[in-house]
Amino acid sequence: MLALAAAAVVRAGDPRLDPWLGFHRRVGVERFFLYATGGGAVPEAADITAVAWPFERPHRPAWDHCLFHHGAGAAWLAFLATDEFLFATDGEDLRMALAAFGRTPAVGVGRLLYGPQGRPGPLLRHAVRRASSDIVLALPAMLRSPGLDAERHESYRPLATRVAFVVQPARTHACRGRYDFAFRDEELAMTEEGRPVVAGWSERAGFERLRVNQYLGGGAESLRTRFADAVPAHDPAPSDDWAPFQSEIDTAVWPVAGVRAAP
Amino acid sequence: MARHTLAIGAIFKDEAPYLAEWIAFHARMGVERFFLYDNESRDDWRAAIDASGQAGRVTALSCPGSAGQVRAYRDCIVRFRGEADWIAFIDCDEFLFAPDGTSLPAVLEEYRDHPAVGVNWVVFGTGGHEQRPAGLVTRNYWRRGRTDVVVPYPAYLRRPGLDPARLDSYRPMNSHVKSIVRPALTLHPLTPHHFAYAGGARAVDEEGRPFDGPWSPGIGLTRLRLNHYWSKSFAELAAKTARGRAWIGPPASLESNRAVERLMNAESDTTIFPFARHLPGWRPLFPEAA
């Protein structure tokens, strides 16, 4: 039985994949289930199970496939993207850290979003600026509920509260969407503070114990492109200005990743 | 006495509850010597120093009277000029470290051609603690103000005559520095934050940019940083307010300090956790894993 595995939908040739794999090996992930879109090859390694995955909307079927075929072999399974880096804030091995959450079927981990790194080189070393933890995007899909005043900041859910899931497969029923799961006995996932996660969102983001750093803007990605999945075509798209995603200096991942500052 | 690469010069008053953690943390970060000036404390600070496990590294001196900070720093420069390559002048609610875990002496080696490095701080709020919680400061407080937070202190005005009602008239709070100086090249302190250097030499920020005064040209937190636990709990903020402040203008009221404190909980910041988690008394994040 694996203590902790991770699943991701990947594209062949994604330059973030190697550092993503290396980082998560370091923090305790024992096996990776990579669902490869686009037909190319993914890295081969003893701890990687690669699955060709030719779906146009790949995440939900991939997560269900992973739960069904590999879930029985892992105590915990993290569902991530290759721009998402999961860690314990004190650098604890995640396998040890997750023992603190054994009573809940899944932990919903808040995310802090980093803007483009601004200069070439290792991602985790150079991407040191992130958005504030209460940043919102004024998109209809981000409204807390329909009908709220679209002009008010408070009407929107902070992006940080859309959680990443680390589930106990034995207590997980199925995937309900890229960012949502159903659990057996109608249980709910919980945040690190013990707050329920509903439909993939938490009421408040924590970050005292666990967090996900999400690195946006890789390559030529624009803000508009990144959040296209949240924006119906007829809705106004957000500005392409990444500046709000670079307001905070935050190097908390460095000692966890073994990164040295650039001299 | 042996020569040391890095020492800390500090003055304290009634800070026994925090001294052991503060000394032990900095010893782990590579500080070899502590020159500590007692300003008429009435608590058992000697026991706190003993509890740090680093008493052999501490030289304790007395600095009675008001406005003692600059006097203590001046004495420290003169008295210990030959005993350390670098002296960091910080307070006992400030924790200095390199965010990538490099030892402080190794980082300072990169700045050996300069008389001083100005280190930016980030300022932490109460995190909602009404009373002093049990345990370590570095564990209990992990909410801070935004990187570019502005506090309308008169001393933070960019220059006289600017409109005090406009936030952009003020320097960002975190561009304020504390100084790590090379005492051999340092004349004397000008404020608790900055010093005069021999031959008109200038301090640099962490990126090597020279600057004058107690504010750096920008805010850098990647080579060196100072976690400033400014308020701690509300009760401790009230006590601190009652003591008055050392130099930055007239004493603040508790009401105005509470207004400032509200700005100091905007962001999570656990950057210090991996370095502090090995200190005695650390409350584990994941008790089941301990």
Image (cartoon, helix red, strand yellow):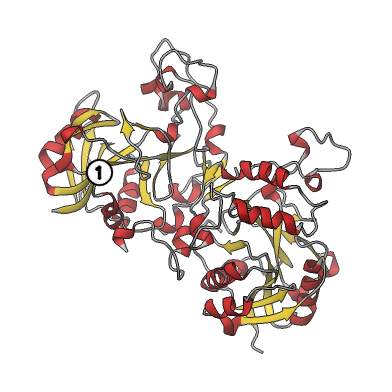
Can residue A122 be seen here? The reply is no
Nearest the eye: B112 or B40: B40
- In the rendered image, residue B169, in percent from the top left (x then y), is placed at 78, 37
- In the rendered image, residue A98, in percent from the top left (x then y), is placed at 28, 52
User: Would you place residue A231 above or below residue A213 in this image?
Assistant: above
Q: How crowded is mark 1: few (under 14 residues within 10 Å), some or many (20 or more)?
A: some
Nearest the eye: B74 or A49: B74
Can residue B244 be seen here? The reply is yes
Q: Which amino acid does label 1 sit on?
A: Thr
Callout 1: helix, strand or loop? loop
Residue at the image point whose x is 56% and y is 50% from the top = B130
User: Would you place residue B28 above or below residue A220 in this image?
Assistant: below
Q: Quadrant of residue B163?
A: top right
Q: In this image, B139 relative to A79: left or right?
A: right
- In the rendered image, residue A217, in percent from the top left (x then y), is placed at 45, 34
Nearest the eye: B87 or B112: B87
User: Would you place residue B94 above or below residue A4 in this image?
Assistant: below
Q: Name the residue under label 1.
A: A104
Residue furthest toward the bottom? B1
Q: Mark 1 lies on which chain?
A: A
Residue furthest toward the right? B161
Residue at the image point whose x is 48% and y is 53% from the top = B270
Q: In this image, B151 relative to A25: left or right?
A: right
Residue at the image point whose x is 48% and y is 64% from the top = B276
- In the rendered image, residue B261, in percent from the top left (x then y), is placed at 64, 45
Q: In this image, B156 relative to A91: left or right?
A: right
Q: In this image, B76 relative to B161: left or right?
A: left
Q: Quadrant of the C terminus of chain A?
A: bottom right
